[in-house]
Image (tube, rainbow, N blue to C red):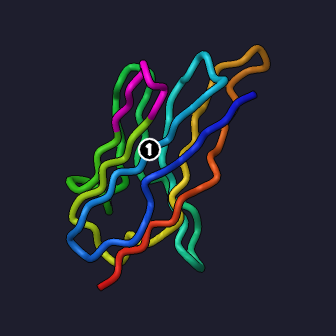
Amino acid sequence: QVQLVESGGGEVQPGGSLRLSCAASGIIFVLDSSWYRQAPGKQRELVARITSSGSTDYADSVKGRFTISRDNAKRTVYLQMNSLKPDDTAVYSCSTRAATGYGPVNYWGQGTQVTVSS
């Protein structure tokens, strides 16, 4: 059974930092992993992605502030968020695209709330 479990969300003041974690189980062949976020009243947006080869991609709004990384041994993907702004407030969800016998399949975590407020 595939499971993605996120942790690390919370409330922080502007300029602060948080690190989100997404621990995966039950997935053998990972194609890529991503972090998305959705703020109230807004569409979900891609924040960062890391491929199986280690290439990364970021939304323009977080470039230079956020870093996505992974620990293959722990099957965990991280999102280090620095210099947080109130506009970063959202529910953050991780997603992993895995290769299966049925083709690529996207799996999602339950989401974790990040609130940036003074």
On screen, 32 above or below 39? Answer: above
Horizontal and vertical percent position of residue 40: 57, 78
Q: Which residue, as the protein is rendered here, is positioned at the far bottom? A: 118
Part of the protein shown in magenta: 69-76
Quadrant location of the C terminus? Answer: bottom left
Q: Which residue is drawn at 24% across and 59% down?
A: 82
Q: In which quarter of the image is residue 29?
A: top right
Q: Which residue is drawn at 37% across and 47% down?
A: 79
Q: How crowded is mark 1: few (under 14 residues within 10 Å), some or many (20 or more)?
A: many
Label 1 element class: strand
Horizontal and vertical percent position of residue 30: 55, 22
Q: In which quarter of the image is residue 101?
A: top right
Q: In which quarter of the image is residue 1?
A: top right
Q: Is residue 62 left or right of residue 7?
A: left
Residue type, mark 1 in image: Ser
Horizontal and vertical percent position of residue 11: 39, 72
Q: Which residue is drawn at 38% across and 20% down?
A: 53
* Residue at image mark 1: 21
Horizontal and vertical percent position of residue 41: 59, 79
Q: Is residue 111 magenta?
A: no
